[in-house]
Image: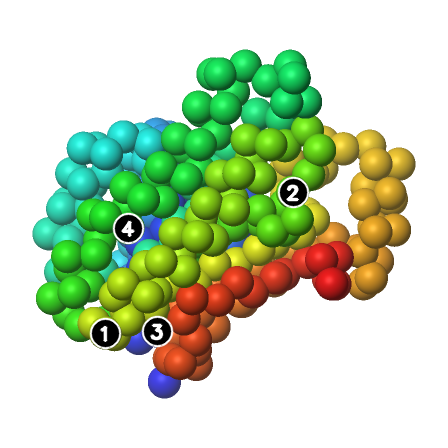
Amino acid sequence: MKLLAGKVALITGAARGIGKAIALRLAQEGASIAFTDLAYDDVARATENELIALGVKAKAFASNAANFEDTHHVVDEIVKEFGHIDILVNNAGITRDGLLMRMTEQQWDMVINVNLKSAFNFTHAVIPTMVRQKSGSIINMSSVVGVSGNAGQANYSASKAGMIGLAKSVAKEFGSRNIRANAIAPGFIETEMTHALTDEQRAKWAEAIPLRRGGSPDEVAKVTLFLASDLSSYVSGQVIHVCGGMNT
């Protein structure tokens, strides 16, 4: 039997990259997939079709994750469509890097709103359903820089650190309702964003990683599967690093 048979997973920002890898991995284990992205465009449609081809129910929803009312409306639509939500993966995120002295208020607000406020929005919207079910797994996609910080990424680091604090607080607040919350802290993951770096920049990153390579989106997805499934039934309030030993 597949690990997530009968489960419904909601993944934010999942049309591409790590979010898409998570959606595919959870679908392979039998989960029905609802996923969001800013627009229902050709990319989202293609991901939706890939998921359906795996033999599961899947649907993409356009959503501004940073908007509280829009988020609640989308979650209501998902519950109507799928009946319940068992797994929430708060993956939506952006970067607007820059040194703190040169960072604009807009750069700060955009990253905090899309990365951290969206996680609050979706968690707030999903929690009532999970409380009624007396079960649920919430997974926040943080980052190693949310633990250790990084020069030039004060806004991103702060947002990702906030997602860790949010997961730990949710774990304590709703553990008695059999709702678990955890965070994943990926390191250098090979995505479209990192492919824009030069070979020299990528080599420098690799030198700082004990495993001497970047990770793949699917390696993050496998840890997400662990936290989403009953394999982690007694794991809550934790941060799991997926960084090749980078933050050891």
**Residue type of the residue flagged with mark 3:** Leu
Where on the picture, by quarter, is residue 171? bottom left
**Residue type of the residue flagged with mark 2:** Gly
Q: Which residue is mark 3?
A: 4
- 4 vs 3, front mark: 4
SS of the residue under disc 1: helix
Calculate the distance from the C-alpha at mark 3 to the C-alpha at mark 1: 22 Å
Q: Which residue is mark 4?
A: 123
Calculate the distance from the C-alpha at mark 4 to the C-alpha at mark 3: 20 Å
Where on the picture, by quarter, is residue 61? top left
Q: Residues within 10 Å of mark 3 (few under 14, many from 20)?
A: many
Calculate the distance from the C-alpha at mark 2 to the C-alpha at mark 3: 34 Å
Asked if residue 137 shows in the view, the reply is no
Q: Residue at x 15, y 59 (%)?
A: 129
**Residue type of the residue flagged with mark 4:** Thr
Q: Residue at x 61, y 62 (%)?
A: 241
Q: Residue at x 65, y 17 (%)?
A: 101
In the image, 98: left or right of 93? right
The disc, 4 or 3, on the residue closer to the chain's N-terminal end is 3
Q: Quadrant of the C terminus?
A: bottom right
